[in-house]
Image: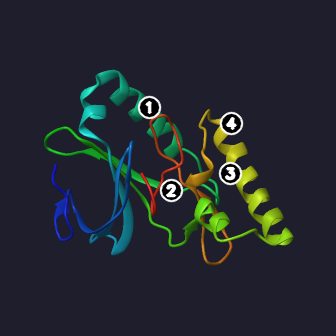
């Protein structure tokens, strides 16, 4: 499916591409029904053509969407395009990834403790549900709140806004 700024994906109006990688492309979009910005991860067509991978993704997305924790991204919806390509709609958070923040230089000790504590709390909740995480999938918001951004497959933190 061709997605470009200004196009529609279901009810969502695509604003911009936020990132791309092996697990798909992430877009910022506007949800006109609730007048909010969301992040949409559109999975690669080859992944959604593989029925085993598709079922695993759906199962893990359901598990991730059941998590209710302040350090884990909210999943709003999972759907598929008319041609069968899966997409995941999640909360959109402004900020930078932990990977990008570390690349700018070391964190102060208090910030390191704060980030580590929040990441640990989010990971503990996710691991109870059997969901894993990678460090580049941790978002640091401007208010110093940490979000693990979960999606799959394999069940992982969603990688918006910087990578997919």
User: Is mark 1 in CB contact (under 8 Å) with mark 3?
Assistant: no
How far apart are the two marked residues, 4 and 2, measured between alpha carbons? 17 Å
Furthest residue to the right? 109
How far apart are the two marked residues, 1 and 3, measured between alpha carbons? 20 Å
Which callout, 4 or 2, points at the residue further toward the start of the chain?
A: 2
User: In the drawing, does residue 10 fall left or right of residue 56?
Assistant: left
Q: Residues within 10 Å of mark 4 (few under 14, many from 20)?
A: few
Q: Which residue is mark 1?
A: 59
Residue drawn at 39 percent across, 43 percent down:
23
Q: Which residue is mark 3?
A: 122
Furthest residue to the bottom? 143
Measured as percent of width and height from the top left, residue 39 is found at 39, 61
Which callout, 3 or 4, points at the residue further toward the start of the chain?
A: 3
Measured as percent of width and height from the top left, residue 29 is found at 31, 67
Residue drawn at 67 percent across, 37 percent down:
127
Q: Which residue is mark 2?
A: 74
How far apart are the two marked residues, 1 and 2, measured between alpha carbons? 16 Å
User: In the drawing, does residue 75 fall left or right of residue 134?
Assistant: left
Measured as percent of width and height from the top left, residue 84 is found at 19, 38
Name the quadrant containing residue 71: bottom right
Q: Which residue is mark 4?
A: 128
Which of 58/146 is in front? 146
Which callout, 4 or 1, points at the residue further toward the start of the chain?
A: 1
Q: Secondary structure at mark 4?
A: helix
Q: Is residue 147 above or below residue 16?
A: above
Q: Secondary structure at mark 1?
A: helix
Residue drawn at 45 percent across, 66 percent down:
92
Which callout, 1 or 2, points at the residue further toward the start of the chain?
A: 1
User: In the drawing, does residue 145 fall left or right of residue 62?
Assistant: right
């Amino acid at each position: 499916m061709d997605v470009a700024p200004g196009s529609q994906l279901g009810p969502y109006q695509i604003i911009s591409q936020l990132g791309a990688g092996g697990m798909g492309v992430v877009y910022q979009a506007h949800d006109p029904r609730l007048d909010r910005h969301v992040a949409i991860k559109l999975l690669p067509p080859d992944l959604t053509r593989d029925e085993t991978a598709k079922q695993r993704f759906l199962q893990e997305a359901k598990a991730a969407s059941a998590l209710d924790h302040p350090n884990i991204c909210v999943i709003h919806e999972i759907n598929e395009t008319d041609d069968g390509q899966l997409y995941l709609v999640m909360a959109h958070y402004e900020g930078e990834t932990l990977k990008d923040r570390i690349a700018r230089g070391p964190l102060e000790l208090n910030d390191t403790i704060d980030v580590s504590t929040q990441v640990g709390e989010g990971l503990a909740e996710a691991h109870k549900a059997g969901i894993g995480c990678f460090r580049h999938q941790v978002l640091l918001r401007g208010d110093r709140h940490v979000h693990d951004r979960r999606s799959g497959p394999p069940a992982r933190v969603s990688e918006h806004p910087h990578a997919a």
